[in-house]
Image: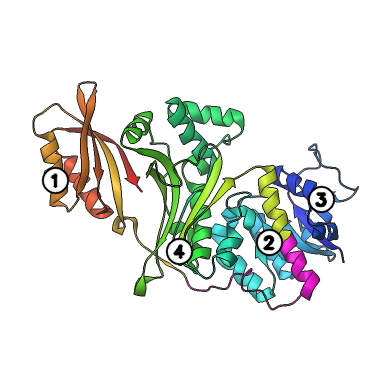
Amino acid sequence: MTVKIGLLGLGTVGTGTAHILLDPTGRNPLLQEISIGKVGVRSLDKSRQVQLAPGVITTDLEAVVNDPEIAIIVELLGGIEPARSLILQAIAQKKHVVTANKAVIARHGDEIYAAANDAGVYVLLEAAVGGGIPIIKPLKQSLGANRISSIIGIVNGTTNYILTKMTTAGANFTEVLIEAQKLGYAEADPTADVDGLDAADKIAILASLGFGGRVKREDVYCEGIRQVSAADITYADQLGFVIKLLAIAKGADGEISEQLQLRVHPTLVPKDHPLANINGVSNAVLVEGSPLGQVMFFGPGAGAGPTASAVVSDIMNIVAILKSSGLTETLDPLLSCVHQHFCQITPIEAINTRFYARFLTKDLPGVIGHLGTTFGNHEVSLESVVQIGFQEKLAEIVVVTHQVCEGNFRTALDEIRTLEAIDSIPSILRVL
């Protein structure tokens, strides 16, 4: 039995996927039973790095989806439209779907999975988070016996590269971003990466799988790394931390087990933490649950080879099911999406976390005392207060808190800003 796939998109990942499927030697024997039926592209004029039979490539994307000989649609277009419409069209024709599109799943996963469950087909997305790192299937299968308590990840290679370079070279954000763009690590428009939007898409997906409930992408609190300065990285280092953009999903216990914290923001990570040494464009996801404890998934989070590896593994999963049991509307619950309810997301002002804040103050007596008093009045406990030095005749003071309620911390800052001695608060970052 040969299973034909329809490939939508022949960019970096699409080309990598085609290379694997066209060269099965030495790989899993199942690959020899998969053929590329049609490939949909936006333009025929672009030069290709893969050789396909005449007539296979077309600009008619719907023709790929509608081809009755194609059993699996592999969506690698990216973006919301036409990807969403084509996925839903494929599902309506009872075709299985493999996608690397985190944006469409994070925003329209509810609609897509409802349609897939009704049609009795699979939508697999291992490549949507973490590139070549296996994390989707482990959350669905290998870790399924655990009660997950947290998923914390470095899931965007661009921002991790920028922060790593700022740390090792002492450079500022803007110059490292320009370098990352020249090297191809950052897009010409880096907004999705540096503002945390890409990471928010990914943690929405991981949280949904890990905590067994649907997640609304707009409920994910999101901060990027534009405000992280070289000074903050230096001070973090002196205090025993490195700064990483973390995507965090945390669950609650007992009766509020469906209440989640979902957030993306730059974070001071202790140097002895497993995520502290994930550098460059690498990704890592740290999962904690009971009874397992902690397990970390680490590897290349993007690129043609790693992402195509994940795409083809999903194709193989579906082909194995078709080969062993044929097309059936009874879905394997460890591969399909079975949850129906929406998780409740804790507002950011209600979470408890630690904070780092950097103050520029006038050289007046009693400043540190005023800071301590104001924080204390709002139930903010301080772990350390350090006067670093002077900057343009202003004293530079760094504060690290214990675990505090974010709302209380923000209220205290609002009051501190009104103090005569306070010139500005250039940095406020959370601490893991």
| Mark 1 element type | helix
Find the magenta span and give its range: 316-341
Q: Do the CB atoms of the residues marked 2 and 4 lie less than 8 Å apart? A: no
> What type is the residue that disc 1 sits on?
Thr
Q: Is residue 197 visible?
A: yes
Q: What residue did someone put label 1 on?
A: 374
Mark 3 burial class by Cα count in 10 Å: few <14, some 14-19, many 20+: few
Q: Name the quadrant containing residue 113.
A: bottom right
Q: Nearer the viewer, residue 369 or 42?
A: 369
Sequence order check, earlier mark of 1 and 4: 4
Sequence order check, earlier mark of 3 and 4: 3
Q: Is residue 86 visible?
A: no
Q: What is the C-alpha distance between the residues marked 3 and 1?
A: 66 Å
**Residue under the point 53% across and 64% down:** 209
Mark 4 burial class by Cα count in 10 Å: few <14, some 14-19, many 20+: some
**Residue under the point 34% across and 59% down:** 347
Determine the residue located farthest toward the left in the rendered image.
365
Q: What residue did someone put label 2 on?
A: 87
> What type is the residue that disc 4 sits on?
Gly
Sequence order check, earlier mark of 3 and 1: 3
Q: Nearer the viewer, mark 1 or mark 4?
A: 4
Q: What residue did someone put label 4 on?
A: 289
Q: What residue did someone put label 3 on?
A: 26
Q: Do the CB atoms of the residues marked 1 and 4 lie less than 8 Å apart? A: no
Q: Name the quadrant containing residue 183.
A: top right
**Residue under the point 82% across and 51% down:** 24
Sequence order check, earlier mark of 2 and 3: 3
Q: What is the C-alpha distance between the residues marked 2 and 4?
A: 33 Å
Q: Nearer the viewer, mark 2 or mark 4?
A: 4
